[in-house]
Image: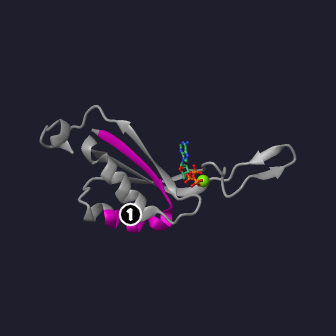
Amino acid sequence: MKWVIAMIQPHKFDDVLLALKAAEFLGVTVSDALGFGRQKGRKEIYRGAEYLYDFIPKVRLELAVPGERVAELIEVISSAARTGKIGDGKVFVIDLERAHRIRTAESGLGAL
Ligand SMILES: Nc1ncnc2c1ncn2[C@@H]1O[C@H](COP(=O)(O)OP(=O)(O)OP(=O)(O)O)[C@@H](O)[C@H]1O
Ligand SMILES: [Mg+2]
C-alpha cells in the first residue's frame, strides 16, 4: 500500500475530484496548504541581500491506495491538474505500512 500526496492548484480541485471519482478512487483527505517549489513563489524577488519567499495557496490531496494503482492514480491526478505552466503541482508517494478500518476491524487492503 502507498500513501499518495498530491499538491495541486486550487482552481483544479473540482476537476481532480471528478477524475478521482470517475476512476473509482473512493477515499481522499483534503486540506488547504501553502507552499512553493522551484520558483520560490511566483518569482524570486531580490530585496537588498535577501530573497523574499512567497507562499502560494495549494490544495493537498492524500490517498491510501494499493501499490498496483499508484501509476494510474498519478496519471489521473496529473491529467486533471495539468495546465502546462509552472506551479501545476507535484505528487509524492510514500510506503504505507498499515491501514485499519475502525468500524469493522479490517486491516490491510481490505481496510482501504
Ligand atoms: N520539494 C518539495 N517538497 C515539498 N513540497 C514541495 C516540493 N516541491 C513542491 N512542493 C509543493 O508543491 C507545490 C507546487 O510546486 P510546483 O508545482 O511549483 O513545483 P516546481 O518544482 O516548482 O515545478 P514547476 O517548475 O512546474 O513549478 C508547492 O507550492 C509546494 O507546496
Ligand atoms: Mg514551481
38 sits to left or right of 105: right
The residue lying furthest to the left in this view is 104
Kind of residue at badge 1:
Val
Q: Is residue 85 above or below residue 99?
A: below
Q: Nearer the viewer, residue 97 or 68?
A: 68
- Residue 83: horizontal and vertical position, in percent? 51, 66
Q: Is residue 102 visible?
A: no
30 sits to left or right of 69: right
107 sits to left or right of 31: left
**Disc 1 secondary structure class:** helix
Task: Determine which residue is flagged by label 1.
Answer: 16
Locate the N terminus by quadrant. Answer: top left
- Residue 79: horizontal and vertical position, in percent? 40, 62
Q: Is residue 88 visible?
A: yes
- Residue 37: horizontal and vertical position, in percent? 60, 49
At x 21%, y 37%, the residue is 100
- Residue 80: horizontal and vertical position, in percent? 40, 64
At x 49%, y 67%, the residue is 11
Magenta-colored stretch includes residue 102: no
Q: Residues within 10 Å of mark 1 (few under 14, many from 20)?
A: many
Q: Is residue 3 above or below residue 58?
A: above
Magenta-colored stretch includes residue 8: yes
32 sits to left or right of 51: left
At x 29%, y 31%, the residue is 97
Magenta range: 2-19
Quarter location, residue 66: top left
The residue lying furthest to the top in this view is 97
Locate the C terminus by quadrant. Answer: top left
| Tally of numbered tags | 1
At x 43%, y 51%, the residue is 6
